[in-house]
Image (cartoon, rainbow, N blue to C red):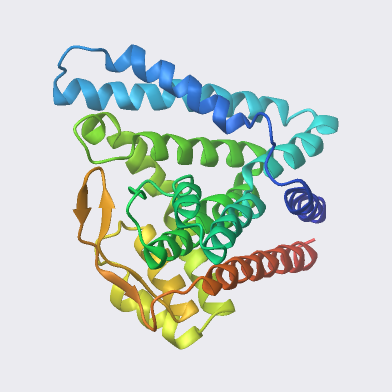
C-alpha cells in the first residue's frame, strides 16, 4: 500500500510537470466563486457584531469545506476509484509547475525591459500593490511568492496526502484558498476571516517547518538555519516567517522590507542575508524549489520501501 501511494505521488508530480494547472477551469477557482456566494449570504450588508462575524466566518468555513472533504473520504472507500481519485486530486492540488511558470514570465518581462508587464504578471502572484514597484521590488516579490507558496502548493500538499490521502489534499488546499480570500486583517475580514486564518495556521504548522528544513538541506545550510533561528518570529506570521526567512538565507539573498499594501506602505523586517535579489535569482529560486520537490519524492519512496 505504501509503495502504491508513493507511485501515486510520482504520477501526480509528473502530471503537474507535464501539464501544469488546468488552462480553462481549475476546481479551486470554482470553489473560490462558491466561497464568494456563501460569504455574501452569511456576512450580509448591515453592520454586524464581532461575535456574529466570528461565528459567521467559522460557519462559512464548515459549510464550504466539511461536506466536500467527507464526500471525497466516502469516494475513497471504493478501491477501484481510490487510486484514480488520489492521482487526480493530488495533481490538482500541486502547483510547482504553475508557480515556476508565473515566476519565469515575470523574469522574462524584466529581462526584456518591460517593467509594466512584469508588474502586471507579479500582481497575479502576490496581494501587495504592484503598480509602482521598481525592478528590484518586482524581483523580490516574485521570489518571496515562490518561497512562501512552495509550502502551500508543493510541500504542504504532499505532507497532507501522505498523512490523510486524497481527503487530506482537499481539506488542506480548500483551507489554503479560504485563508487567501479571507485571512486579511482589514475592516471586512478581521473577524469574519479569523477562523479561516487560524485553521490555516494549524494545517500549515508542520508543513511550514518541513518546508524550512527542506530549504536548509537544498540551500546554504548554516546560513539558512541562522536565519530561521533569528528571523522566523519577526512579524510575518507563525508559518510564513519560518518559510521565507529560511528560504532567503538558503538562497543567500535579502528579502522582506517595506512593501505597499492596500494604499499604504507596510514596514516589514528584512529577511535572510546577502545581496538584494537580481532578475537571474528568480530562475535560481525556481530551480531551488524543484530540487526540494525531488528531495521529497526521494524521501517518500525510500520511506515507502523501508516500511513496506
The percent position of residue 283, horizontal first and vertical second, equals: 59, 69
Depicted 153 relative to depicted 70: above or below: below
Which quarter of the rendered picture does the C terminus lie within?
Answer: bottom right
Q: In front: 270, or 111?
A: 111
Picture quadrant where residue 56 is located: top left
Q: In front: 31, or 282?
A: 282
Picture quadrant where residue 306 is located: bottom right
Depicted 190 relative to depicted 75: above or below: below
On screen, residue 45 versus residue 199, left or right, reads left
On screen, residue 244 versus residue 172, left or right, reads left
Depicted 35 relative to depicted 184: above or below: above
The percent position of residue 230, horizontal first and vertical second, equals: 29, 78
Q: Residue furthest bottom?
A: 222
Count of number-bearing discs: 0
On screen, residue 229 versus residue 153, left or right, reads left
The percent position of residue 40, horizontal first and vertical second, equals: 35, 15
The percent position of residue 288, horizontal first and vertical second, equals: 60, 71
On screen, residue 5 versus residue 273, left or right, reads right
Look at 56% across and 66% down and name the residue there.
111
Q: Residue furthest front?
A: 113
Look at 76% across and 64% down and name the residue there.
301
Q: Residue furthest right?
A: 80
Depicted 9 relative to depicted 252: above or below: above
Amino acid at each position: 500500500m505504501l509503495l502504491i501511494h508513493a507511485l501515486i505521488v510520482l504520477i501526480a508530480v509528473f502530471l503537474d510537470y507535464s501539464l501544469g494547472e488546468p488552462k480553462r477551469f481549475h476546481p479551486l477557482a470554482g470553489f473560490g466563486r462558491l466561497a464568494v456566494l456563501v460569504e455574501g449570504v452569511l456576512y450580509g450588508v448591515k453592520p454586524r457584531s464581532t461575535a456574529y462575524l466570528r461565528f459567521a466566518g467559522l460557519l462559512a468555513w464548515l459549510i464550504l469545506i466539511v461536506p466536500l472533504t467527507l464526500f471525497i473520504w466516502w469516494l475513497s472507500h471504493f478501491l477501484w476509484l481510490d487510486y484514480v481519485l488520489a492521482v487526480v486530486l493530488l495533481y490538482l492540488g500541486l502547483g510547482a509547475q504553475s508557480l515556476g511558470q508565473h515566476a519565469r514570465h515575470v523574469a522574462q518581462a524584466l529581462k526584456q525591459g518591460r517593467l509594466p508587464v512584469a508588474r502586471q504578471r507579479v500582481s497575479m502572484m502576490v496581494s501587495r500593490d504592484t503598480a509602482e514597484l521598481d525592478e528590484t521590488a518586482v524581483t523580490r516579490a516574485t521570489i518571496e511568492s515562490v518561497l512562501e507558496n512552495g509550502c502551500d502548493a508543493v510541500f504542504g500538499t504532499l505532507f497532507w496526502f501522505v498523512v490523510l490521502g486524497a481527503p487530506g489534499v482537499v481539506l488542506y488546499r480548500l483551507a489554503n484558498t479560504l485563508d487567501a480570500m479571507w485571512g486579511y486583517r482589514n475592516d471586512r475580514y478581521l473577524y469574519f476571516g479569523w477562523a479561516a486564518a487560524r485553521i490555516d495556521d494549524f494545517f500549515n504548522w508542520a508543513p511550514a517547518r518541513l518546508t524550512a528544513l527542506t530549504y536548509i538541506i537544498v540551500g546554504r545550510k548554516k546560513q539558512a538555519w541562522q536565519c530561521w533561528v533569528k528571523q522566523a518570529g519577526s512579524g510575518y506570521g507563525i508559518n510564513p516567517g519560518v518559510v521565507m526567512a529560511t528560504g532567503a538565507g538558503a538562497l543567500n539573498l535579502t528579502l522582506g522590507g517595506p512593501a505597499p499594501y492596500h494604499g499604504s506602505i507596510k514596514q516589514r523586517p528584512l529577511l535572510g542575508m546577502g545581496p538584494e535579489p537580481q532578475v537571474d535569482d528568480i530562475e535560481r529560486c525556481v530551480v531551488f524549489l524543484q530540487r526540494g520537490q525531488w528531495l521529497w519524492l526521494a524521501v517518500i519512496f525510500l520511506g515507502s520501501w523501508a516500511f513496506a
